[in-house]
Amino acid sequence: MERTHFNGRLSESNVNEEVTLVGWVHKWRNLGSIMFIDLRDATGIVQVMVNTEEIEIPDVRNEYVIQVKGTVSLKEVENKKLKTGKIEVVAKSIKVINTASQTPLIIDDNTDALEDTRLKYRYLDLRRPCMQEMLRIRAKIVKAVHEYLDANDFFEVETPLLCLSTPEGARDYLVPSRIHKGHFYALPQSPQIYKQLLMIGGLERYYQIARCFRDEDLRADRQPDFTQIDIETSFLDQDQFLTLMEGMIAKIMKDVKGIDIELPLRRMEYDEAVNVYGSDKPDTRFGMHLIDLKDIFLNSEFEAFKTAKSVKCIVVDNIADKTSRKVIDTLNMEARKFNLKGVTVLKLENNELTGSFTKYLKEEESNALKERLNFKNNDIVIIAASDSNRDVCFGLGALRSNYAKELGLIKPDTYDLLWVVHWPLFEYSEKEGRYVSNHHPFTRPCDEDLKYLDSDLSKVYAQAYDIVFNGYEAGGGSLRIYDGKIQKKIFEILGLSEEDIQNKFGTFIQAFNYGTPPHGGMAFGLDRLAMILAGTTNIRDVIAFPKNLSAVCPMLNAPQPVDEMQLKDLHIKISDED
């Protein structure tokens, strides 16, 4: 198909040139003797002007694929909405290459289609310029990653998609083996074991744009199959590794957004993130910090505050007059998601504290609150209490984030990057009644905390780190265990029997006997990075063919049942039982 130029790249420098263009009819307007066509291709839109009295015009409609031959001309009045708005193409001939039915959604940045419709007709949704721009941002990130890591002596290595099922925190997607009856592969939740074996294999610096799979409940920033920028290195300490990764982030920001970020990035202790911001992925673009009140309520008449191990609050400015009983009920519902019975809300009105809790409040407690919180008339104080400091912090942190969005406390087009470091190695699972890995079982404990492995697991911290971007976890990793005895000890703490260790990690443990180097790495969420830099809050916008919140592809209607012969080949029988 003949084409001399891309539509979105025409400019004043092309004036008086003869051009041949192709693309889709984005819009058309027939004014009688003159017709205007907005012609769209992957690079953008250019206006075509047609003198209907001079050339024969075929029938054209929206989304028809056409070829236009003509001359580039300056416009009398610039269209500032178009990148090509200073010029237009005066048509000499128009040829229809293919026709189109009326589309089920408007092909434009502002579409009226619901997301279900967009996903069902994703091939049409992808024609929208904003969608193509978001995928272009994603591609730029990948390009920057390749360029940076290749220049820093990394190997790009592909690892298998059919692997062994191992406990890594989420359910595996299992693949039945036809050849080995009753046996299953698993799709990788991450290439974790492979990349550590590559370090044992002496590659020293590995990376991969890796496809990963986790069978877990979905949300706006999560997909069952996703992509991560997977990285592992040998012979670097934590500071050296984080510095190397900061260089990559700086290149991504410069190449994709044209922004120079200041290095080194801030490094915040995990405990500070949780206790001050109420999150292990703190958004520091606004204040509203958590404030400790336990000492004020040591002798409180309110038993829940007096006996609780943790009492904290946040102050929300200038919202008391909008905080109705219904709003407080909503706050309590949110708090219950974090195992809190509820929250206590106080208002400052006419320099007096008001609210049902004031009947328990002593004068000295009221004065101490006013002095410590430094709040103003029409502010509210939201207090949470529990024996679990984690529940108090995360519950208030969620309310903090909700109010930041509601009150517009975050400046648009701002970027907040930091490392959260020094994580607990374990967390206690109330559901399982035992300690589980905070990240994964290969994370290296801090040397000074090894003594606590036999006495108090809550005191064991890890050489682990997450990079936080605008309140999102954009990536995470750790230095890894490279001593086989310590690795075996961690497996035993996590409740794995000797048989489990051999079945699931036998080769991995054996490899430790052959000179394992100190190593560590991380994985960046490519989808999440693209989502943040594209300015959307929906991860599906930056994935060409995503699943919906039910883990279904509406376009292909997958998953679907398969026929009995396929099941028989795989030695599988479907049960009617739940």
Image (cartoon, grey):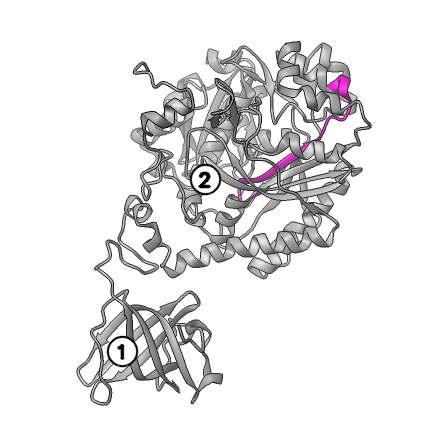
* Residue 141, image x, y percentages: 57, 53
Membership of 474 in magenta stretch: yes
| Of residues 357 and 144, the one drawn nearer to the viewer in this rendering | 144
Q: Is residue 538 visible?
A: no
Which comes before the other along the chain, label 1 or label 2?
A: 1
Give the residue displayed 48% in from the left and 27% down from the top. 175
* Residue 41, image x, y percentages: 39, 67
Which region of the structure is painted magenta?
Answer: 468-486
In the image, which disc is placed on residue 420?
A: none
Would residue 376 appear left or right of 164 to someone viewing this image? left
Q: Which residue is mark 1?
A: 36
Number of the front mark, 1 or 2: 1
Q: Amino acid at mark 2?
A: Asp
Q: Which residue is mark 2?
A: 221
Is 290 drawn above or below residue 115 in the view shown? Answer: above
In the picture, the quarter occupied by the N terminus is bottom left
Measure how far apart labels 1 and 2 are at the Cα level.
41 Å
CB within 8 Å, label 1 to label 2: no
* Residue 4, image x, y percentages: 45, 78
* Residue 289, image x, y percentages: 55, 35
In the picture, the quarter occupied by the C terminus is top left
Q: Residues within 10 Å of mark 1 (few under 14, many from 20)?
A: some
Instruction: Count up the numbered dots.
Output: 2
| Of residues 563 and 169, the one drawn nearer to the viewer in this rendering | 563
